[in-house]
Amino acid sequence: MKRSLLGTPIAASEITPREIFEQRRTLIRAAAAGVFGAALSPWFARSAFAQTGAATGLAKLAAKANAQYLPKDKLTRYKDATTYNNYYEFGTDKADPALHAQTLITRPWTVAVEGHVKNPKVYDIDELMKLAPLEERVYRLRCVEGWAMVIPWTGVPLAQLIRRLEPTADAKYVEFITLADQKQMPGVSVPVLAWPYVEGLRLDEAMNPLTLLAFGLYGEVLPKQNGAPVRLVVPWKYGFKSAKSIVRIRFTETEPKTSWHVAAPSEYGFYANVNPAVDHPRWSQAKEFRIGESGDLFSPKVKTLPFNGYAEQVASLYTGMDLKRFF
Ligand SMILES: Nc1nc2c(c(=O)[nH]1)N[C@H]1C(S)=C(S)[C@@H](COP(=O)(O)O)O[C@H]1N2
Ligand SMILES: [Mo]
């Protein structure tokens, strides 16, 4: 049970976007009256607290909002973004990750950087988080299944990290390997995918300013079901490219063998760029539904845009490529 700002308990199911809007207004008024002692930053207005009116118990992760990536669409409710998830290491049902991921141990946590790179190193997560200033960016992310969400992420552009690591001339791709620990992750005993979950990007895709290494959402550290303590967010590609709970980043010469491509090569390509013109073999990709909003997978309401709406920033990465072939 959640509590409204005035302390009256309200059921989560009763919270409507309108109430959240009004809750936010109340918070803004409270701030204007000096209740919080300082003016509200845009970051505060988008925080988990502003969304739920209650503490989540997760650590705050303050960051400067990047003005280039402010919200253009209505934000997905925190509650929806953290209870409707894909994280197969914790089960294949959308509700499974929130229910079962709480056993994930996120400290201590290391990320090994290896392969064709001048400065290979095993980073402690807290060290990795300090390599570049954290920013908040609102991104749309669309799952290949047809649902999408709009989230304020906190992270660092992956390019800033890669520049420090200095990949060598042989590095053409970046492979992301995520945790696969049977003791903590019940889904790893189920052979739905070849574990560990592996994803990859071409080096120039990884270096594109949009590619984010995320440590948080809604102003707090990532909830475990969303890929704590560190995940990728690649907003112009289908959600499965955005690997959760990364433990190794490897620079390679050849295209990484990514989990979904290995599992079903005719359905999931290496590129996985959001493309309404190329259907999945079993369903259309023309439209999407935003989770928590009216409609559902069978009556999607929103038109899907090429590159998920980020064509201006990324289309040039694919000049001359047949995107029906390289799907
Ligand atoms: N390790 C890992 N990362 C993963 C997945 C997964 O099953 N395991 N699922 C992917 C898919 S299919 C999607 S759509 C997004 C979902 O992210 P979200 O639950 O935070 O919305 O995570 C991606 N990253
Ligand atoms: Mo997905």
Image: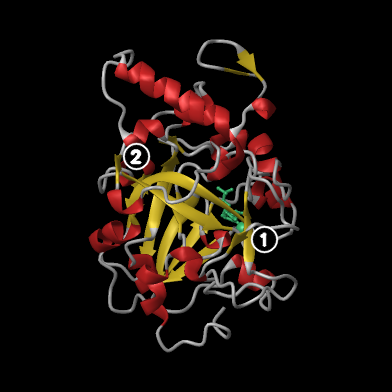
320 relative position to 195: left or right: left
Residue 313, located in which quarter of the rendered image? bottom left
CA separation in Å, label 1 and label 2 = 33 Å
Q: Are marks 1 and 2 in contact (CB under 8 Å)?
A: no
Q: Residue at x 47, y 31 (%)?
A: 48
Amino acid type indicated by mark 1? Glu
Is residue 232 in view?
yes
Question: What secondary structure is found at the residue carrying circle 2?
Answer: helix
Q: Quadrant of the N terminus?
A: top right
Residue 107 at what x, y percent from top left?
Answer: 45, 35
Residue 31 at what x, y percent from top left?
Answer: 33, 19
Q: Tell me the quadrant of ligand 2.
A: bottom right
Q: What crowding class fits label 2: few (fewer than 14 Cα within 10 Å), some (14-19), or many (20 or more)?
A: few
Question: What secondary structure is found at the residue carrying circle 1?
Answer: loop
Colour option used? secondary structure
57 relative position to 67: left or right: right
Which residue lies under the disc numbered 2?
126
Which residue lies under the disc numbered 1?
145
Amino acid type indicated by mark 2? Asp
